Image (spheres, grey):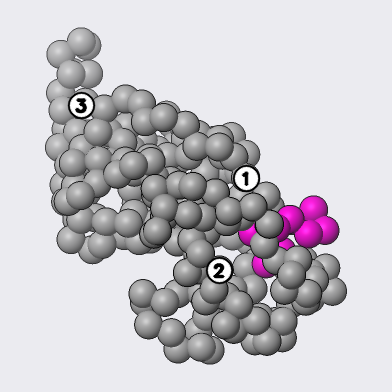
């Protein structure tokens, strides 16, 4: 799990968030995180993730069901699912977080196919949206937050096409990562960001024509 950096660059305010401005015009090399099978293989999940203590407790409440969907590359010992140390971090509810453990060279919840068993289990549990089993920052990646800032996680750039920025990419980041943006901004906030992105692209095209 990587240490997050201080916010940099310019931002667009959307609701209570400051969204990194470069994301308004950025493009990506691949098609996006939802193309797991051929672009991602769960690589971003390998090192685990920091989660809130309520998220940890929710997972433990469903430990028996989690064990049922694990494979032979994972441990069913719940004591091995999380790191021991609890960290101070104001980005999490209650200002505290804990890391998921790495087991067999990958996140304890990642199966042999590179898929999250928490995500696999969720539909059968019928949980409300506010009680999702898959942690928030897993759902948000390759976006991350820092004290009210919503940014691209540069530490994943270049690792996989789905999470690599490319000036000649065929898809806009805000389109490829629509699901992830909506996790933080909601539907209305995402629409506001898309309009800001359209304005930014028109401004960029106008400047390009002037220089030409």
Q: For the residues marked 1 and 2, what is the alpha-carbon distance in whole angstroms?
A: 16 Å
State which quadrant residue 73 falls in: bottom right
Mark toward the viewer: 1 or 2: 2
The furthest residue to the top:
211
* Residue pointed to by mark 1: 1
Viewport quadrant of the C terminus: top left
Give the SS element for disc 2: helix
Mark toward the viewer: 3 or 2: 2
* Residue pointed to by mark 3: 205
How crowded pointer 2 is (Cα within 10 Å; few <14, some 14-19, many 20+) is rated as: many
Question: Which residues lie in the magenta part?
Answer: 100-110
Q: Nearer the viewer, residue 94 or 179?
A: 94
State yes or no: residue 152 in magenta: no
Q: For the residues marked 3 and 2, what is the alpha-carbon distance in whole angstroms?
A: 46 Å
* Residue pointed to by mark 2: 56
Look at 18% across and 61% down and name the residue there.
188
Give the SS element for disc 1: loop
In the image, is residue 21 above or below residue 62? above
Direction from residue 167 to residue 114 in the image, left or right: right
In the image, is residue 136 above or below residue 155? below
Residue 70 visible in rendering: yes
In the image, is residue 124 above or below residue 4? below
Q: Residue 56 placed where, x, y %?
A: 55, 68
């Amino acid at each position: 799990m990587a240490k997050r950096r201080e916010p940099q660059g310019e931002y667009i305010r959307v609701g209570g968030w400051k969204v990194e401005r470069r994301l308004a015009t950025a493009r990506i090399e691949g098609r996006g995180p939802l193309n797991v099978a051929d672009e991602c293989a769960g690589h971003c999940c390998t090192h685990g993730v920091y989660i809130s203590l309520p998220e940890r407790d929710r997972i433990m409440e469903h430990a028996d069901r989690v064990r049922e969907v694990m494979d032979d590359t994972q441990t069913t010992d719940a004591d091995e699912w999380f790191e021991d140390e609890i960290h101070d971090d104001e980005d999490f509810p209650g200002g505290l977080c804990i890391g998921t453990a790495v087991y067999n060279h990958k996140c304890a919840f990642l199966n042999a196919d590179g898929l999250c068993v928490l995500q696999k289990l969720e539909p059968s549990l019928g949980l409300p949206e506010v009680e999702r089993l898959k942690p928030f920052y897993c759902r948000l990646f390759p976006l991350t937050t820092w004290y009210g800032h919503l940014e691209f996680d540069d530490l994943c750039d270049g690792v996989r096409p789905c999470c690599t920025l490319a000036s000649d990419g065929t898809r806009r980041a805000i389109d490829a990562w629509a699901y992830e943006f909506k996790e933080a901004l909601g539907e209305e906030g995402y629409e506001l960001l898309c309009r800001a992105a359209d304005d930014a692209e028109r401004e960029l095209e106008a400047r390009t024509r002037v220089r030409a």
